[in-house]
Amino acid sequence: MAKAILYDESKCTACRACYVACKQWNVLSAAENKKLGTYYNALTLGGTTWNLIDFIEKDDPDRFRWHFITQRCMHCGDPSCAKVCAAGAISKDEETGFVLIDNDKCLGCKNCHYACPFWEGVPRFREEISESEKEWMDEGNEVPGKRVAGTMFKCRGCIDRVQNGLEPACVTTCPPDALQFGDRAEMLAVADARVALLKERGEAKAQIYNPEGVGGTGVIYVLTDDPEVYGLPADPKVSTADMVTKWLTGLITAGILTIVPFWMVFKAAEAEGKGGE
């Protein structure tokens, strides 16, 4: 039966314990960041950052408030990343519904990154494996999944834990129970009840985020405002190989348009040079 992680924004305190737990369980090295006056441990998802908490300030007419959101792979029911993967390296686990990358097959082409409608493309490229990870593995320790340089990485749903009867590391460590885990149908029922309670408490915009345009998601959100406030698309759709092809065509066209003026100047200078001979 398909599983799901439920994230309740109304309970989240942005303690970032989930961020640390993800790093620890998956043996992921710290991301190098500049001090920009933020509360962030990492500014964006990356090859070694599969989960982070985003801080969003909103000045409502009646009050100033913080919104928090966990950014991670949404584990779509109909994943765009799998549809456009050139190597067939991305698949859904039949038992849990988690979307997984086989790094032994991955070419690092980044099609999955550009096709993903969430968080500016969830799968991220890793050029190399960190020394700390290499040292850990050289000592005979295992790491969840494979570590192959030049490939794409993202949240794996802690599938190794789940297959052994445990919850994902992020869920286990969440102090206010803003993260829950279980059968997907059960998590949707919990979300429904929570939204009803929030509306009774005056949260008029309380809602479930489980977009059907991507076949529903394995990470379900309870939000207290519109999806766009959190950087989420209101109605994401499944990307296709055609869409990625169009993107690449646009990129190539832009490159050509950039080069043509320089080529024309070069040809004009060449013609002028020959005329003066």
Image (cartoon, rainbow, N blue to C red):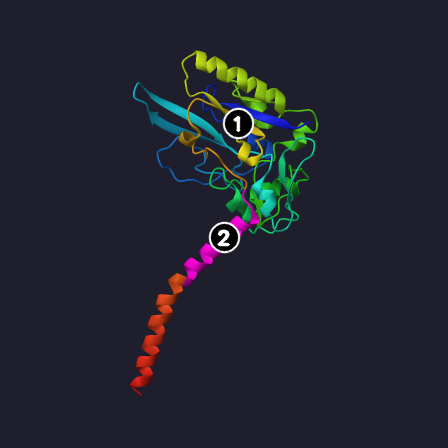
- The kind of secondary structure element at disc 1 is helix
Which span is picked out in magenta?
239-256
Residue 250: % across, % down: 45, 55
Residue 183 visible in the shown view: no
Locate residue 234 relative to residue 213 in the image: left or right: left
* Pointer 2 residue: 246
Total numbered badges shown on the rendered structure: 2
Give the residue furthest to the top: 200
| Neighbourhood count class around disc 2 (C-alpha, 10 Å): few under 14, some 14–19, many 20 upward | few
Quarter in which the N terminus is drawn: top right
Q: Residue at x 39, y 29 (%)?
A: 56
User: Disc 2 marks which amino acid?
Assistant: Lys
Q: Residue at x 38, y 24 (%)?
A: 66
User: Disc 1 marks which amino acid?
Assistant: Cys
Q: Nearer the viewer, residue 253 or 126?
A: 253
Q: Nearer the viewer, residue 263 or 44?
A: 263
Locate residue 275 relative to residue 236 in the image: left or right: left
Quarter in which the C terminus is drawn: bottom left
Q: Nearer the viewer, residue 166 or 277?
A: 277
CA separation, marks 2 and 1? 37 Å
Residue 113: % across, % down: 52, 45
Please name which of the two marks, 2 or 1, marks the residue nearer to the observer: 2
Residue 31 visible in the shown view: yes
* Pointer 1 residue: 18
- The kind of secondary structure element at disc 2 is helix
Residue 175: % across, % down: 52, 19
Magenta stretch secondary structure, dominant = helix
| Neighbourhood count class around disc 1 (C-alpha, 10 Å): few under 14, some 14–19, many 20 upward | many
Q: Nearer the viewer, residue 172 or 135?
A: 172
The answer to which image quadrant residue 169 occupies is: top right
